[in-house]
Amino acid sequence: MLQSGAIQINQLVKRFGDFEAVAGIDLQAPPGAFLALLGPSGCGKTTTLRMLAGLENPSAGEIYLNGRLVADGLRGTRVPAGQRDAGMVFQSYALWPHMTIYKNVEWPLKVRGWRGRRRHERVRQVLTLLDIDALADRYPGEISGGQQQRAAIARTLGPNPKFLFFDEPLSNLDAKLRTEMRSELLRVHRLSGATSVYVTHDQVEAMTMATHIAVMNQGHIEQLGTPRQLLQHPQTPFVANFIGTPPANVLRVQVQGGQYIYKHLVLGQAKGKDVNQTLLLMYRADDLRLRFEPGARRLPVALAEITPVAGRAIVTVWDNQQRLNVLVDHLLDGADHRDYFVEFPDQPTIVYKSDYDRYAFPNTVTDALSMRQPKVLP
């Protein structure tokens, strides 16, 4: 098979005993991409990254880096991690506490045979790039968490790898520092010219940093695309309900008498072929309206929370176990005790067929289409 991407994964599988953590995924990424593996805990994203880095062996499938076969699960082929021209930044920083920051960054260069002045100049270069040159003589325990993360990134960049792998590197930082470090990581990625793969469960990180995102769930890639594509054209109900601030709303409905029925509420006329079946309807938060009296296509709900967002507000409500998000223009007073109703438009944004019952949404349990076709970055 012709390998055209910087990263190519073919039917990659990883099993731990009877548990299949990664379930036969296909993926291509071009040189210089910043690819985020995004999904909830346990979806297989870190396991996939560790197989790319050579820290785990696949049970089946192939991994190519720049056209070179580095892992083949069935044949037992495995190129060691240190020979993949890749650097990895861990969540825990993993700095050597008995070495200064300078020595931490220098050590991988020594291992790779960088000598004398060339090695010294490279260490100073990456320390300056990460704005920690003044910390060169300090030990990890003498600097802040954010500075330790910069040192870990500098150490990874030292040998100038062609691939950068990040395993939730910002999760130990406070909110303000995470925002600052996102910009730093993007700057480092662009200056390095490396192809980067970034694991996160935080969609804000993925949407603001990545050129492309692979949304993972239960060992599968639900959808691969740009942030805009995922927001505008979610291919599965899981993606619709996972991506976005707030995410879209997905309701399980019955088609009866040519109408969409949610419980006993008529939500609109069904399309021609959507008859006598269960479907999933997607509504964006700004498609819905919050009302305070009953009416057509209005669902009585209970108020959960109100979140201010840039002069507007996200109102989260509950209908039993169904969580709904509604975007409103003005911040409401959550202390009032009015009755709340959600009004639906006469047609949903997207209709999904309910063919499989395999995936769990963050807020509801429902079906999703199985998207098993190869995922290729454009």
Image (cartoon, rainbow, N blue to C red):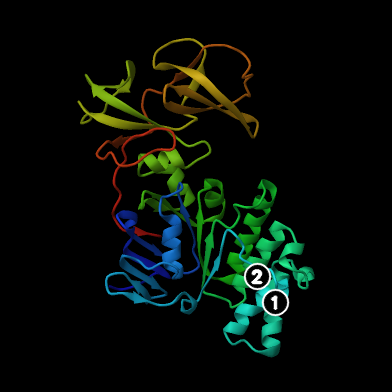
Q: Secondary structure at mark 1?
A: helix
Q: Amino acid at mark 2?
A: Trp
Where does label 2 land, which residue? 96
Q: How many marks?
A: 2
Where does label 1 land, which residue? 103
Q: What's the mark number on residue 209?
A: none
Mark nearer the viewer, 1 or 2 = 2
The residue most toward the bottom is 116
Quadrant housing the C terminus = bottom left
Label 2 packing within 10 angstroms: few (<14), some (14-19), many (20+): some
Residue at image location 32% in from the left, 15% down from the top: 264
Q: Nearer the viewer, residue 236 or 345?
A: 236
Q: How far separated are the C-alphas under marks 1 and 2?
A: 9 Å
Residue at image location 66% in from the left, 46% down from the top: 175
Q: Secondary structure at mark 2?
A: loop
Residue at image location 52% in from the left, 36% down from the top: 246
Q: Is residue 267 above or below residue 93?
A: above
Q: Earlier in the sequence, mark 1 or mark 2?
A: 2
x and y, in percent, of residue 28 in the image: 38, 64
Q: Is residue 336 above or below residue 85?
A: above
Find out whether the residues at labels 1 and 2 contact each other: C-beta distance under 8 Å. Answer: yes
x and y, in percent, of residue 33 in the image: 49, 64
Residue at image location 66% in from the left, 78% down from the top: 106
x and y, in percent, of residue 375 in the image: 35, 57
